[in-house]
Amino acid sequence: MSDRDTDIEFDFFEEPETREAARPVRPPLRGGPRRPVRTPQGFTPLLRLVGLIAFVITIIVLLIYAVQGCESSGKHAEYANYMSKVAQIGSHSQSVGGQLATVLLTPGTRTADLERKLAALARDAAQDVDAARAINPPGRLRDEHTHLVDALDYRYMGIAGIASSLPQALKARSATSTVLELPAERLIASDVIWDDSFKDPAKQLLQRDGVGDVRVPESHFVQNPDFYTASSLSSILGRLKGGNVTVKAGGLHGTTLVSVKAMPQGTQLSSTTQTPVVATSNLAFVATILDAGNSAELNIPVTLTIRQTPLIKKTVVLPFINPGERRTVTFGNLGAPQFTTPVKIVVSVKGVPGETNLSDNSATYPVIFTLK
């Protein structure tokens, strides 16, 4: 083997020279190496859970309020709808009561016509009963609704009783009201039942249910309970017969003009001294009438005259007054009074049948109208 061969073999197996890559050397940090900042692994999910719970609670609360609002709105609508139906029936029934009084106050009506009118009013009252029974009341008002039907039924029975008894009473020689008293009491009782057993309890229930703003209707079949007393019914029978009977309450008839006031100030007029009267836009005069006899009186015309140019004249009918009772009539919508010039106001009460002394039925009042 030659020297050349030896050199080649040596060169072939010789390891190449290695070089390390130069790397920057960082100076050591003061205080030791800084740890990486990381969010605590358990805190973020907790926040998310709390937020989710708050969101769910908010939704539940809103849903509760929404449901309660819907329930309240539905309850209010239910009660309002029911009371609206009752109001229509009550208003019609009250008008029937007014018509009955008018029929009974009309003197000289033929018996056949009277029976026909009373039968028509009884049918109207029966229709009110049927209409009330057809209403489906809110559950908590069922008892009150039953009393409402009872009140309307009493009205029907009262009219029917008067209709069946009146022809017999008119045939009697004296104006006795005995057969009319029981049906008349039913009419008076109907208003008591409406107020005490329906209206007042219904108001209390609506207040408890939070719908107190829903109006509970009134219905007064009898405007004046004295109209159906024994003495008044006797007078009514006498008028229906044309006045040719002896009234059980007594034979003395008469009315008296007690006083006249200018409203709304309430200024008392004087028949001897000129009275200044403020002429407001709602000027009216109120006359007080006294039944000075011992008989009830019906349909009494009362007239007020303001003697100026142009003349102002108004007549109002006092429908009913009992012995010893004081009733008022009001004169309104009088037109334009005459200012600064003294005028006289005359108020006159027409004499009732059988009245002989008319000296206290009228009076003249000197007045002067002012703006203030």
Image (cartoon, rainbow, N blue to C red):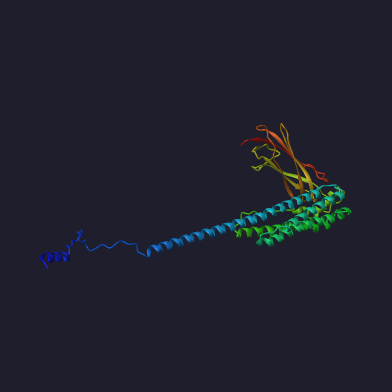
In the picture as drawn, the residue positioned furthest to the bottom comes out as 1
Q: Position of residue 365 (x, y in %)?
A: 71, 38
Residue 58 visible: yes
Identify the image quadrant of residue 258.
Answer: top right
**Front-lying residue, 268 or 215:** 215
**As displayed, is residue 242 above or below residue 23?**
above
Give the mark count: 0
* The N terminus sits in image quarter: bottom left
* The C terminus sits in image quarter: top right
**Front-lying residue, 335 or 130:** 130
Residue 223 visible: no
Direction from residue 235 to residue 48 in the image, left or right: left
Q: Position of residue 188 (x, y in %)?
A: 75, 56
Q: Position of residue 316 (x, y in %)?
A: 75, 42
Direction from residue 351 to residue 138 in the image, left or right: left
In the picture as drawn, the residue positioned furthest to the left comes out as 3
Q: Position of residue 53 (x, y in %)?
A: 46, 62
**Front-lying residue, 165 or 48:** 48
**As displayed, is residue 310 above or below residue 158?**
above
**As displayed, is residue 139 above or below residue 99?**
below
